[in-house]
Image (cartoon, helix red, strand yellow):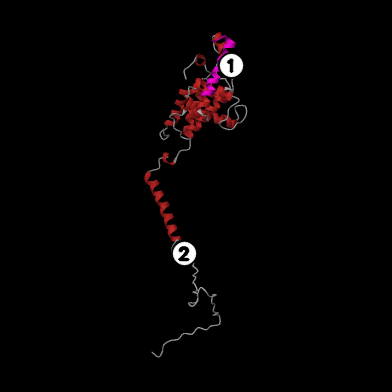
Amino acid sequence: MPEDKTEQLLKSLAVRTLGSDADSRIVAAVQAAHATRPRRWWARGIPLWQAAAACLAVFAVTFLGVRASSSPAAAPPRVQTAPIDSPQNEKADRPPYYTDISGWKVSVVTNQGG
Amino acid sequence: MGGTDGSTGQAWALFYLEHRQALAAYALSLTGNAHDAEDLIQEVLVTMVRQDRPIRSAKPYVLRSMRNLACDHGRANRARPRAATLDGIDVACVDAMLDDASRRELAQAVREALGSLEPAAVEVIVLKVYCDLTFQDIASVLDRPMGTVTSYYARGLAKLRTVLEQELNYA
């Protein structure tokens, strides 16, 4: 956009400033802010080896903690479930065949006669 | 630019001294008086230093921060949401206290003519003429499309020309 006469007129007018006292106060405030600003940890002169050692220590503690909590001794007992097979003579065209085994007695037969 | 060697405070102080006219013009437009304008500039620059902001191409960012802060503080007549038009934009940045009587009269006429424009146009004109920003930077400061900004500027200048022609027989 070419600069027209009105724009030139506006630019030719004086613009108010805040004055040298205000300038000094602002500059002083800015420099003071730099002195009192919260510094990042890497700007505090902490040696690199100390930062690395701290990271390693945190990693080691975390790793050992996770490993201890996942060991078998610490694991809760698991409930074991066993499937009950259906009778072998059950066929698809018959109704299911149930056998009440609550009254049965179990005896162990050993072949002592050889 | 990092803030590790004590250069940031000095760099921002130099930034202020280099751009003080633009910062003062916009701050005066936002606040309407020198005291609040000084507070506004100081608060924004101190925040920049504390946050270790990079100083490269910082002028639009600083001006936008000033605008947001002025909105937050309700310094422009009443609090407004961010990126809204400031109805309270002032033309206090145009100095009518010149030594030469004819220049003083001209400055007063321009102030009155600017005051007759819509606030958004005044803000764009102040940012373009007195803060020396590009239209792209103005769009980023105002958070508006560049087409809208250029339209405000063209309409504002056209109306300003008409008003000045009527008042000063300026052609």
Q: Position of residue B12 (x, y in %)?
A: 46, 28
Q: Residue at x 43, y 59 (%)?
A: A67
Q: Which residues are magenta?
A: B150-171
Report the front residue among A95 and A101. Answer: A95
Query: For the point 57% across and 13% down, which residue is it?
Result: B164
* Quadrant in the picture for the C terminus of chain A: bottom left
Q: Is residue B148 shown in magenta?
A: no
Q: Which numbered mark, 1 or 2, is in the foreground of this view?
A: 1
* Residue at 43% from the left image edge and 63% from the top image edge: A71
How many labels sit on residues? 2
Residue farthest bottom in this picture: A113
Residue B25 visible from this viewpoint: no
Identified by mark 2, the residue type is: Ala
Point out the residue furthest to the front here. A93
Q: Secondary structure at mark 1?
A: helix
Magenta segment main secondary structure? helix
Residue B157 figure quarter: top right
Q: Is residue A54 above or below residue B39?
A: below
The amino acid pointed to by label 1 is Ala
The correct choice, above or below, for A90 with respect to B107 in the image is below
Disc 2: CA contacts within 10 A as few (<14), some (14-19) or many (>=20): few
Secondary structure under badge 2? helix
Residue hosting label 1 = B113
Q: Position of residue B6 (x, y in %)?
A: 42, 32
Q: Visible in this render: residue B19?
A: yes
Taking the magenta stretch, the answer to whether it contains residue B166 is yes
In the picture of the structure, the residue carrying the numbered disc 2 is A74
B6 vs A2, nearest the viewer = A2
Across and down, in percent, residue B7 comes to 42, 31
Q: In the rendered structure, the residue with mark 2 lies on which chain?
A: A
Q: Which mark is residue B58?
A: none
